[in-house]
Amino acid sequence: MNNARFDEAARESLAECVKELERNTDAEVVIIVRARSAPYAHADYLFGTLLAFAALLFLLFSPFSFHQFWVPIDVVVFFVLGAFVSSRSNFLRRLLSRAGFRSQAVRIAAAAMFYEAGIANTNAEMGVLIYLSLLERRLELIADRGVLKRVPAQEWNLELSELHEAGKRPEPEHFLQALQRFGNLLAAHLPPTGENPNELPDMPWFDLK
């Protein structure tokens, strides 16, 4: 998955979608898109170790002759090379990490951002965080009590499922479509009253490094 798809043009499109959504509802929606929700150093070191072990086996059992002086050096070089390659590959990091770890990392990061970004502090408790983590291909949605009280649970869970599916294919087009459908749900149950000012920024926060 190419993070470059979530570029400045995608950010502007999502910002316009949030503005339109908030014109039709009292909810305050904040979008955060991150490259990953954890460092994944353990996956990098694991791949480095596997590559170094493969190199060691080759050196030990190869029909070619190698001076023993080079064996530890080559093993270290292959470990560093493997760790570097893994650090640049979402595929390898997903392959070498547990699904439970990835899910928990996204949940923890989303919960932290819900408070750090001030979404939990809106006057009418109408804050909604939509948090998309690209490496994990996972989306988390956290809504404040004012939203959850007024949207029927069955409809909420249905739209939440749609958003989670969009998170499994983290591309701006799919994400934007799911967000628009979610906006229709908010508009139906949380129509604008004119008493809820725009308390949070409409521009999504992208952290793709």
Image (cartoon, rainbow, N blue to C red):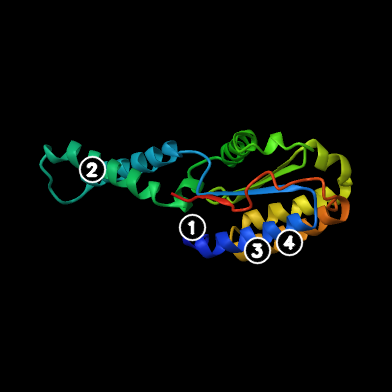
Q: Amino acid at mark 4?
A: Gln
Near mark 2 (Cα within 10 A), the count class, few <14, some 14-19 or many ≥20, is some
Determine which residue is flagged by label 3: 174
Label 1 vs 4, first from the N-terminus: 1
Residue 92 vs residue 37, the one in the foreground: 37
Determine which residue is flagged by label 2: 77
Is any atom of residue 78 visible in this view? yes
Residue 68 vs residue 159, the one in the foreground: 159
Position of 41 with respect to 174 (left or right) is left
Determine which residue is flagged by label 1: 3
Disc 4 to disc 3: CB gap under 8 Å: no
Q: Amino acid at mark 2?
A: Val
* Mark 1–mark 4 distance (CA, rounded to whole Å): 22 Å
Determine which residue is flagged by label 4: 180
**Which dot, 2 or 3, sits closer to the camera?**
3
Label 1 vs 3, first from the N-terminus: 1
Label 1 residue SS:
helix
Residue 24: % across, % down: 80, 57
Near mark 3 (Cα within 10 A), the count class, few <14, some 14-19 or many ≥20, is some
Near mark 1 (Cα within 10 A), the count class, few <14, some 14-19 or many ≥20, is some
**Which dot, 4 or 2, sits closer to the camera?**
4
Position of 162 with respect to 106 (left or right) is right
Residue at 70 percent across and 35 percent down: it is: 120
Q: Amino acid at mark 1?
A: Asn
- Which circle marks residue 84 in the picture? none
Q: Quadrant of residue 172?
A: bottom right
Position of 121 with respect to 102 (left or right) is right
Label 2 vs 3, first from the N-terminus: 2
Label 4 residue SS:
helix
Label 3 residue SS:
helix
Q: Amino acid at mark 3?
A: His
**Which dot, 1 or 4, sits closer to the camera?**
4
